[in-house]
């Protein structure tokens, strides 16, 4: 498979040249990065040209790279009381609605759309990553005219990430409720949400209220009192 993947990567580099921003092979999987301007042209060729013949789009999703590379759980040091990872709030898990989300300085665009194509004829797969150029209003071209299976996937990415798909004929929310505020898979969206709903017996309907619970991130603790362990008497067998 690795040889086939390298051959595909070479063919893509030769065929598209500057139309593709990058082409890499990792774990025998080919990934290309394409700008929104060139996405439709590249995808049309990948579908129609016999050398590629990617006749089906099997998956499409959004990605938010706002906190890419940040982690609360990485710690290489430990002491008598165990690891201290997860104690300091670094990532968005502890945000309340309206809080600013910490983010590292990076040249990477925040939002991207990742598509997975398969060629049954040539028995090969490819991943396409397309970054939205504007973080405030992320827009990428819709692939629904090339692969109809992209329809609900793009609606899901719009609903959960707020990514707009230029050319989509019915870009409505797919999973969240009517009147939902925000996009819940964005890194700056609080885990507890911003509203909660309950049934009001007096009004005899479901009502929405500001969320009343606090963000709760479970932090495992490992307590190691080395001195106490060394001084403890051995139990009789």
Image: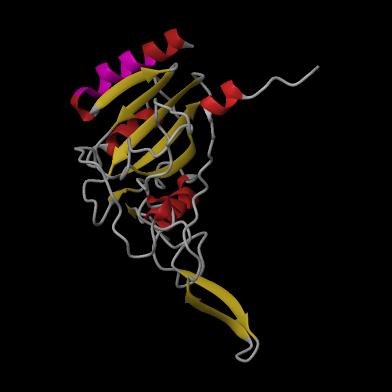
Q: Main secondary structure of the magenta part?
A: helix
- In the image, taking residue 202 as reference, residue 145 lies left or right, namely left
Image quarter for residue 28?
top left
Out of 120 and 172, give the one closest to the viewer. 172
Q: Relative to residue 120, is residue 203 depicted above or below? A: below
Residue at (28, 58) in percent of width and height: 100
Outermost residue on the bottom side: it is 202
Out of 146 and 220, give the one closest to the viewer. 220
Percent coordinates x, y for residue 211 in the rendering: 48, 70
Out of 33 and 52, give the one closest to the viewer. 33
- In the image, taking residue 60 as reference, residue 113 lies left or right, namely left
Outermost residue on the right side: it is 237
Residue 9 sits inside the magenta stretch: yes
First to last magenta residue range: 8-17
Residue at (46, 53) in percent of width and height: 156
Percent coordinates x, y for residue 162 in the rendering: 36, 56
Residue at (27, 46) in percent of width and height: 103
Residue at (49, 28) in percent of width and height: 118
Q: Relative to residue 78, is residue 153 depicted above or below? A: below
Residue 141 sits inside the magenta stretch: no
């Amino acid at each position: 498979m690795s040889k086939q993947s390298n051959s595909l990567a070479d063919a893509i580099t030769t065929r598209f040249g500057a139309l593709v921003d990058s082409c890499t092979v990792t774990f025998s999987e080919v990934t290309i990065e394409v700008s929104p301007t060139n996405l439709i042209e590249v995808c049309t060729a990948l579908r129609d040209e016999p050398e590629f013949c990617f006749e089906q789009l099997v998956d499409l999703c959004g990605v938010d790279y706002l906190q890419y590379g940040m982690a609360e759980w990485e710690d290489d040091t430990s002491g008598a009381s165990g690891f201290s990872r997860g104690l300091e709030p670094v990532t968005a898990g502890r945000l309340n609605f309206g809080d600013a989300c910490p983010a590292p300085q990076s040249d990477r665009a925040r939002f991207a759309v990742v598509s997975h194509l398969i060629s049954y004829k040539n028995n090969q797969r490819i991943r396409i990553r397309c970054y939205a150029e504007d973080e405030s209003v992320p827009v990428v071209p819709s692939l629904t005219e090339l692969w109809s299976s992209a329809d609900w996937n793009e609606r899901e990415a719009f609903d959960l990430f707020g990514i707009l798909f230029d050319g989509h004929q019915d870009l409505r929310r797919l999973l969240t409720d009517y009147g939902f505020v925000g996009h819940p898979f964005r890194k700056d969206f609080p885990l507890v949400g911003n509203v909660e709903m309950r049934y009001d017996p007096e009004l005899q309907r479901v009502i929405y209220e500001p969320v009343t619970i606090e963000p709760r991130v479970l932090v495992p603790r490992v307590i190691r009192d080395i001195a106490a362990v060394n001084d403890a008497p051995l139990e009789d067998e």
